[in-house]
Amino acid sequence: MKQTQFDINTEIAWCPGCGNFLLLQLLKESLDELDVDPTNVVISSGIGQAAKMPQYVNTSFFNGLHGRGLPVATAISLTNPELLVIAEGGDGDMYGEGGNHFIHTIRRNPNIVHLVHNNMVYGLTKGQASPTSQRGFKTPLQSEGVISEPLNPLALAISLGAGFVARTFVGNRELTKEVIKQAVIHKGYALVDIFDPCVSFNKVNTFAWYKEHSYVLGDDWNASDKIQSLVKSMESDPFPLGVLYENPERQPTLTEMHPAYQKEDTPLFKRRRSVQELTSLME
């Protein structure tokens, strides 16, 4: 296994064979290949098996409440725009409990990378259906099969104006690394939905299933056409993999638009206020 400056010697509490092991290594390799300084990276997550990942990377991190990885990541990026901020978690954490945060983070366009481990099931809480579970999928709670339409995060993100929207599969190592690196380089909000099999609680959507039910977009794919990308994002059997959409015109980020940075570009965490100013604010 390739050694990187992001490696950390700690015991990993995932099931043997979990796709998270692959994604963990690919994320570390991607950051290493981009020559990112680990001291300039912060990973924010909520609750879940996927949300444990920041604890296994040699960077700063924040583990918060279920579904709250995105608002924390937004605040960190706004406070210190010099950091590379990554919000990371599972499909339940990010699209279920964090669904409203997902919507409004796209609207705000903070300069963050959003990595979602999509295994179409809740892994930490023992196998309930998640927002991306397919119709008919049977679980201990949905014993007759899921009846709800699965959430389409890519179509939602594109329609709301996200500047970078991609999907990959951990079984395709080189594609996953390339997509993560492109998301890091992108200025603004970047969504990467990652097929990442749960070997314990989803015996349907396995490594073999994702491989059989997905395909990689060709070199002739035009990711700058929003309408075409929206149509492509609605394909589901097979699922398209790669960068589905990247806005050819860079949109201003939350930091660039925020009033706090209009008159002063010093990062918020470096600003100091006098006792008199603080007293006046309190009053």
Image (cartoon, grey):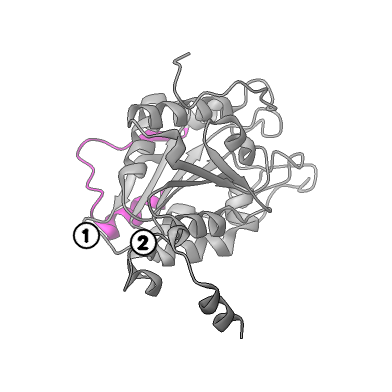
Q: Residue at x 62, y 26 (%)?
A: 18
> In the image, is residue 144 above or below residue 194?
below
Q: Residue at x 42, y 66 (%)?
A: 108
> Dot 1, how many residues are within 10 Å of its Cα: few (below 14), some (14-19), or many (20+)?
few
Considering depth in this image, is 12 or 194 the residue closer to the camera? 12
- In the image, is 142 to the left or to the right of 136? right
Q: Position of residue 175 (x, y in %)?
A: 36, 30
Q: Nearer the viewer, mark 1 or mark 2?
A: 2
Q: Residue furthest top?
A: 1
The residue tagged 2 is 266
The residue tagged 1 is 249
What amino acid is at disc 1? Glu
Q: Position of residue 232 (x, y in %)?
A: 34, 50
**CB of mark 1 within 8 Å of CB of mark 2?**
no
Report if residue 237 is visible in the image: no
Considering depth in this image, is 132 or 18 the residue closer to the camera? 18
> In the image, is residue 27 above or below residue 281?
above
Q: Residue at x 78, y 45 (%)?
A: 143
- In the image, is 160 to the left or to the right of 58? left
> In the image, is residue 5 above or below residue 138?
above
What is the span of residues highlighted in magenta in the rendered image?
213-235
What amino acid is at disc 2? Thr
Judge whether residue 152 is colored magenta: no
> Dot 2, how many residues are within 10 Å of its Cα: few (below 14), some (14-19), or many (20+)?
few
Marks 1/2: CA–CA distance: 26 Å
Q: Position of residue 103 (x, y in %)?
A: 50, 64
Q: Position of residue 226 (x, y in %)?
A: 28, 59
* 1 or 2: tag closer to the N-terminus: 1
